[in-house]
Amino acid sequence: MNEKPDAIVFFDLDGTLFDSHLNVLSSSLEAIIKLKKNNIIPVIATGRTKCEVIDLMYKTQIDSIICMNGQAVIYTGEILFTNNIDKDVISRLYQFSKQQMDIPLSFYNHQIMRVSEYSEPAKVFYQYIKQEVPQVDDKIYLTQPIQMLLLLCEEGESNYHEVFPELTFIRNTPYCVDVFNNGGSKGNGITNLLNKKGFNNVPTYAFGDGMNDFEMFQTVDHPIAMANAVDQLKEQAEFVTDTNNNDGIAKALQKFGLI
């Protein structure tokens, strides 16, 4: 593959590259192989962190990722960008969550995941995404950079907005809310990748289905929504493909002449 790709394609995971059973369709795996043969770089763009999807990256042979909704950018193994949350802000949010909201937290960077306590909300959320509950360490933010937090809750995030104006809160599943620095997004991660690698004149495509893909759709040249995407995202799309269960990835890549 040449150093500068002919195009870059960004793939959200849940509801997009993953089918409803959290598997990758064979048609999508074949399409990714064809992309790479055509000098087109596939990049994962997800709310998840890298250590959650390392097996997927090995299976798909995708070695670049914009993770935690743009809070870390890793391109062919090189860390291009991280967006760390200030420790004092995390401390305030942890105390507010524990003392006033009774909401447990998860702490994330591109290498580790920890939870503030082993709790029913943690069990429910990680079972929902088919993962084991991470180790408990409510002081991890004092010794490790943290790029994203999760509020493990089904409601209550609106109480945080005025108290923490420096943070963004996005509900990503029925059981958790992603928390990161204002201005952080998949779109910001993509901009950092393009700027740092000198790829600003490379055509960009993105597949997504949820509201954490909104800024990504505003950043790339060709935003493509899955048929199962939320209506607000479909309105931002250049094209709406088939569902994540019905070869939507491969069909759109064929339509755009990328494979």
Image (cartoon, rainbow, N blue to C red):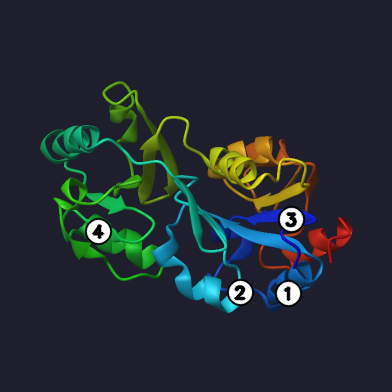
Secondary structure at numbered mark 2:
loop
Callout 2: few (<14), some (14-19), or many (20+) C-alpha neighbours within 10 Å?
Answer: some
- Work out whether mark 2 precedes mark 1 in sequence or the reverse, and give the earlier one: 1
Instruction: Work out whether residue 10 or residue 211 is closer to the camera in this orientation and state it.
Output: 10
Q: Which quadrant of the figure has residue 182?
A: top left
The reply to whether residue 219 is in sight is yes
- Work out whether mark 2 precedes mark 4 in sequence or the reverse, and give the earlier one: 2
**Residue at the spot of label 4:** 114
Residue appearing at x 54%, y 76% in the figure: 58
Tell me if 110 is positioned left or right of 252 in this view. left
Q: Amino acid at mark 2?
A: Gln
Q: Which mark is residue 4?
A: 3
Q: Amino acid at mark 4?
A: Arg
**Residue at the spot of label 2:** 61
The reply to whether residue 227 is in sight is no
Q: Which mark is residue 33?
A: 1
Alpha carbons under labels 3 and 1: distance apart: 18 Å
Between tags 4 and 3, which lies in front? 3
Between tags 3 and 1, which lies in front? 3
- Work out whether mark 4 precedes mark 3 in sequence or the reverse, and give the earlier one: 3
Q: Is residue 105 above or below residue 248?
A: above
